[in-house]
Amino acid sequence: MKYTQQKILIYYSIFNLGGAERSTSKLITKLLDKGFSVEVLLIANGGEFQNQIDTRAQVNWLRSGNFGVKYAENKGVLKFLYLLLYALTRIEEFLKGFVYKFKSYKTVIIGLHGLSPKFCLKNIKADRYIQFIRNDLKSCDTNHKAQNQIKKYSKFIDNYVCVSETALDSFCELFPDLKEKGKKIYNLLQSEIIQEKSKEILEESPWPKEYTNILTVCRIQEKSKGVFRMAKVLKELLQQGYKIKWYIIGEGMDFKEFQHYLIDNDMQNDMVLLGQKSNPYPYFKQADLVAVLSYYEGLCGVVNESKILEKPLVATEFSGIKEQIENTVNGFIFENDFESIVEGMKKVLDSTSNLQATAINGMPNEIINDNYKVEQLIALF
């Protein structure tokens, strides 16, 4: 069925490289394929993944740059300059609010649970308003920012789309009165595109075969991804004689501090920071093992991607992982603390045959079937 001329607006903060952005990008393409007219409205222009948005979608923004972050990162004259630019972009946002008062849409989708829907509700007319919940709010929303926004605006939001059963359970526990508005719809995968992109030939030298090559793809941030804990796990394993090279794809707020930490501990050749990669999938192909050792996740995209590419996987016990992985069948799940991760890694590394036996997809059809997920979402429009 084609939904020609039905206008959808997807509201997002800034389109940087991350799992939520990849999933949203796939959703945009699927909606366009169905015939919807899709507009992406960003709070700030200039995200690293913005150029990956399907060219058939209209992309607009409220602020010409993300100068608030630049202001926080700099000092002296530059700090004052970015403060001025930030003030100008806030005026720009205010003026564009008037423009959107003359527009209307079938559905507005607020793409993140931490993103206030205030601008959309105040300025944009739509038949339906939907907001995504991408994590277990009890675990990730420690400052209650998202929860307070849900309390404030829930009467205007028609549905909250939770990307895992765990996220939905958490939402319903925190907001029992909103249970009927909560819906579970898994993130989109686009398996065929991931598989095709994994065939790209890398210019870098192949990873050394005499080591166990481990890959992690994540935002370089301790709060959610546990990158410093991950380095300490590697240090412990190296001290116990394991031959490991651990590669990390990603950037983030803790990148420089983490880089210095690795240098100070003489680990920069053992845990190699590859930076951001627009196409990480060829690196999955090189890896002997993919590791996702986060403190918390939603329905983790890296887990999905590693299973699509049939790579062995280890993960900590976070939101959604037991919906994706059956422990020891298509991956290994560790309790989410340092000692359990170290002991779990040792067992996995000591049993190559068991590790290779998990190099299968093995995820349920409900997670794999993108068309089913899109139709579930469209039914809410």
Image (cartoon, helix red, strand yellow):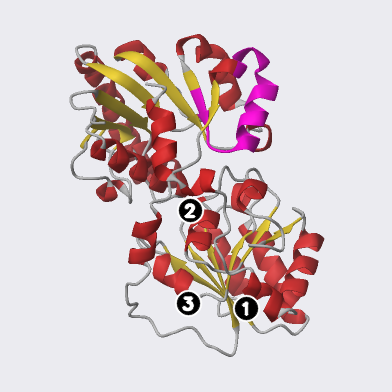
Is residue 338 one of those drawn in magenta? no
The mark found on residue 252 in the picture is 2
The amino acid sitting under disc 2 is: Gly
The amino acid sitting under disc 3 is: Gln
Going 35% across and 45% down the picture, which residue do you hit? 26
Q: CA distance from mark 3 to mark 1?
A: 24 Å
The mark found on residue 266 in the picture is 1
Q: Secondary structure at mark 1?
A: loop
* Snapshot quadrant of residue 56: top left
Circle nearer the viewer, 1 or 2:
2
Count of numbered labels shown in the rendering: 3
Mark 2 / mark 3, whichever is N-terminal: 2
Q: CA distance from mark 1 to mark 2?
A: 21 Å
Q: Position of residue 10 (x, y in %)?
A: 33, 30
Residue 346 visible, this angle? yes
* Snapshot quadrant of residue 135: top right
Q: Position of residue 81 (x, y in %)?
A: 30, 39
Badge 2: residue crowd in 10 Å (few <14, some 14–19, many ≥20): some
Q: Which residue is mark 3?
A: 286
The mark found on residue 205 in the picture is none
